[in-house]
Image (tube, rainbow, N blue to C red):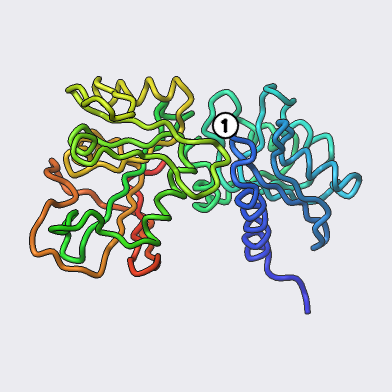
Amino acid sequence: MGLPPPGLRSRVTLARAIELARDANHRAYPKPTVGAVLVRDGETVGEGVTETAGRHAEIVALAQAGERARGATMYVTLEPCAHHGTTPPCADAIIAAGVGRVVFGAPDPNRLAAGGAERLRAAGIEAEDAGSWEARTLDEAWRTWVSLERPFVIYKTAMTLDGSLALPGERWVSGPAGRRYVHELRAQVDAVAVGGGTARADRPRLDARDVPTPKGQPRRLAFSRGPLPDGIELELRTGAIEDELRSLAGEGIQSLLLEGGPTLASAFLHAGLVDKLLVFIAPTLAGAGPRLAASLPSSRTLSHLSARRIGGDVLLEAYVQQT
């Protein structure tokens, strides 16, 4: 039984690099966590993930492979860097090790670090962009932060099967499993926000409860022109959305989870500042009630739609735009 075709072999090995990075769970935050695999003659000779101390995945994999890196193919989730940062350029280390080919999942959007593929090709090494969506999503928040200088914005809501965001006489639309998942989301992002109306009506805490918080608690915000009542422990942001997002990015906020109602959703969608939608669909009919977006100037076509069961609800995930 021979080796699989080269195209399939590339996908399988890149999938392993993605798995390594995903299992590391943002270990290198606030930098991207990258996975790398070295293969020679069909055998894996080195693997690596970006370390907390800053050593890049490519360097870890090369060190593990040693002399077996010569002539090997490296599969790495992100284009190898070409600049001197906390470490020397990975592209130079790959060239020095004699690697014969590099397949990377996604190009580096960081203008300071990009150019590794060109440097490899100039040295006679084949460098292929695999165009992997899975690789891009590994560091989607960081990609938006470095390229657009604003946080990656996720809008999360729950609705009934007939599209209402509220149930008469009920506090929650989604079930217990969905609500727990929201706490897991909060633990993964840098900030969580609602609009002023939601802050005043519900007085939400917006913290992550009863789940691991490896990055600590997110910053908790309210976007509102007017003041908040006493006792609401949310950070008030009163400026234009674009200006506030730029300011948050400057403070190191790479990801923002919106949990507000249709007014906040419409404001962000109208401004083109929502990147990803998470919509819980509950198996309930409300008959009437507020809808997802109060008004939009035009229709929006979403991409990469997926659905999965979470408890008794269905979670729909889709991207409004891609970076």
The answer to whether residue 172 is above or below residue 235 is below
Q: What is the residue that sits farthest to the bottom in this orientation?
A: 1
Residue 18 % position (x, y): 62, 53
Residue 223 % position (x, y): 26, 29
Looking at the rendering, in which quadrant would you find the N terminus?
bottom right
Left or right of 65, for residue 166: left
Quarter holding residue 261: top left
Residue behind mark 1: 30
Residue 206 % position (x, y): 36, 39
Residue at horizontal 79 percent and vertical 63 percent from the top: 42
Left or right of 13, for residue 276: left
Camera-side residue of 156 and 116: 156
Q: What is the residue that sits farthest to the front in this orientation?
A: 231
Residue 294 % position (x, y): 12, 44
The answer to whether residue 148 is above or below residue 299 is above
The answer to whether residue 61 is above or below residue 307 is above
Left or right of 286, for residue 191: right
Residue at horizontal 43 percent and vertical 25 percent from the top: 249
Quarter holding residue 169: bottom left
10 Å neighbourhood of mark 1: few (<14), some, or many (≥20)?
Answer: few
Give amino acid for label 1. Pro
Find numbered disc 1 in the image and state the secondary structure of the residue it sits on.
loop
Looking at the rendering, in which quadrant would you find the C terminus?
top left
Quarter holding residue 205: top left
Camera-side residue of 46 and 91: 46
Residue at horizontal 72 percent and vertical 33 percent from the top: 91
Residue at horizontal 67 percent and vertical 57 percent from the top: 16
Left or right of 296, for residue 277: right
Q: What is the residue that sits farthest to the right in this orientation?
A: 67
* Callout count: 1
